[in-house]
Image (cartoon, grey):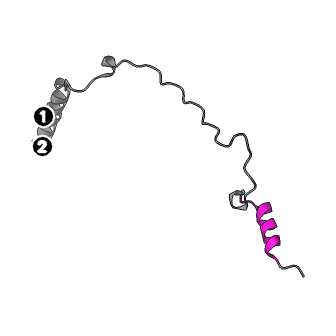
Amino acid sequence: MKKTLLFGLLAVSMLSATSCKNPDVRSEEDMATKPLPEIPAAPDTTGGKTAPANPATREINAANATEDIKKMQPVM
């Protein structure tokens, strides 16, 4: 009894899923595709100047950390 009920529900769900089609949903066939335009280059707002050395924006690595520690040590 349970197996036939399960198979019956499965068959009904398959029929309802294949027979119903929503007309509001557009398929890939209905859509025209065209390539997107290229992304423009970012504008140069610095006027060609390089950024000054800023210790806050330096890369954190062992060499830079060692230099910073040496600068903080008192000279004897």
- In the rendered image, residue 70 lying in the magenta stretch gets the answer yes
Foreground residue among 6 and 24: 24
Main SS, magenta region, reads: helix
Q: Amino acid at mark 2?
A: Lys
Q: Give the class, few, some or many, for how many residues have Cα within 10 Å of label 2's Cα (few <14, many ≥20).
A: few
Farthest left residue?
1
Determine the secondary structure under disc 1: helix
**Picture quarter with the C terminus:** bottom right
User: Which residue is disc 2 drawn over?
Assistant: 2
Q: Nearer the viewer, residue 6 or 26?
A: 26
Of callouts 2 and 1, the N-terminal one: 2
Task: Please give the name of the residue rendered at 32% of the width and 17% of the height, measured from the top-left corner.
Answer: 29
Q: Residue 3 falls in which quadrant of the image?
A: top left
Nearer the observer, 74 or 19 = 74
- Determine crowd level at label 1: few under 14, some 14-19, many 20+ residues with C-alpha closer than 10 A: few
Which residue position is annotated with label 1? 8
Nearest the camera: 66 or 15? 66
Residue 30, given in percent of the width and then of the height, sits at: 30, 18
Q: Nearer the viewer, mark 2 or mark 1?
A: 1
What residue span does the magenta drawing correspond to?
60-73
User: Which element carries disc 2, helix, strand or loop?
Assistant: helix
